[in-house]
Image: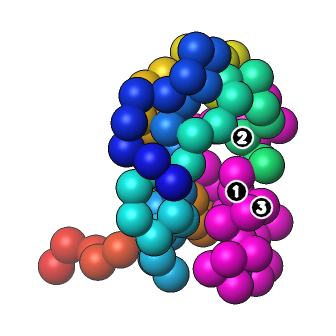
Amino acid sequence: MTDKDPKPHHLLVAILTTAGAYPADGFNEEPENQPIKVELEKAAKVLKLTNTATWIAKVGDTELDIEKSYASYHLSGKVEINYGPRETGGGASAS
């Protein structure tokens, strides 16, 4: 884990879930052409996440196709990926 500037063609990645963050502190340095799912699978294993098949990964408001690489989304520097179940509609109705 590191907080330093990444090597060329790498970026710093943190996965944020309701169960915790991976890594617990800071970021992991990952190759920009690596599929996003590789780091998500590591996070799921370490955080003991189950039933993640329907979960989504987002950076900001952008939903990521986890089969694609970080580079395909032009992600660079420090990237925090929010990973969790898709939020469903609904909520309180107006009275």
Residue at the disc numbered 1 = 40
* Vertical arrangement, residue 30 with respect to residue 49, above or below: above
Mark 2, Cα crowd under 10 Å, few <14 / some 14-19 / many 20+, is many
Residue visible at 38% across and 36% down?
Answer: 4
Nearer to the camera, 22 or 29: 29
Nearer to the camera, 77 or 65: 77
Nearer to the camera, 89 or 33: 33
Residue visible at 51% across and 54% down?
Answer: 1
Mark 1, Cα crowd under 10 Å, few <14 / some 14-19 / many 20+, is many
Do tag 1 and tag 3 residues touch (Cβ < 8 Å)? yes
In the rendering, at what x and y percent does residue 21 appear? 47, 68
Residue at the disc numbered 3 = 41
User: Regarding mark 2 in the picture, which secondary structure is present there?
Assistant: helix
In the rendering, at what x and y percent does residue 60 appear? 39, 39
In the rendering, at what x and y percent does residue 27 appear? 47, 50
Instruction: Give the image quarter of residue 65.
Output: top right
**Residue 36: image tag:** 2
Label 3 or label 2, whichever comes before in sequence order: 2
**Residue 24: image tag:** none
Q: In screen coordinates, is 83 left or right of 80?
A: right
* Vertical arrangement, residue 88 with respect to residue 72, above or below: below
Q: Is residue 24 highlighted in magenta?
A: no
User: Mark 1: which amino acid?
Assistant: Leu
Report the magenta residues as a range. 39-68
Mark 3, Cα crowd under 10 Å, few <14 / some 14-19 / many 20+, is few
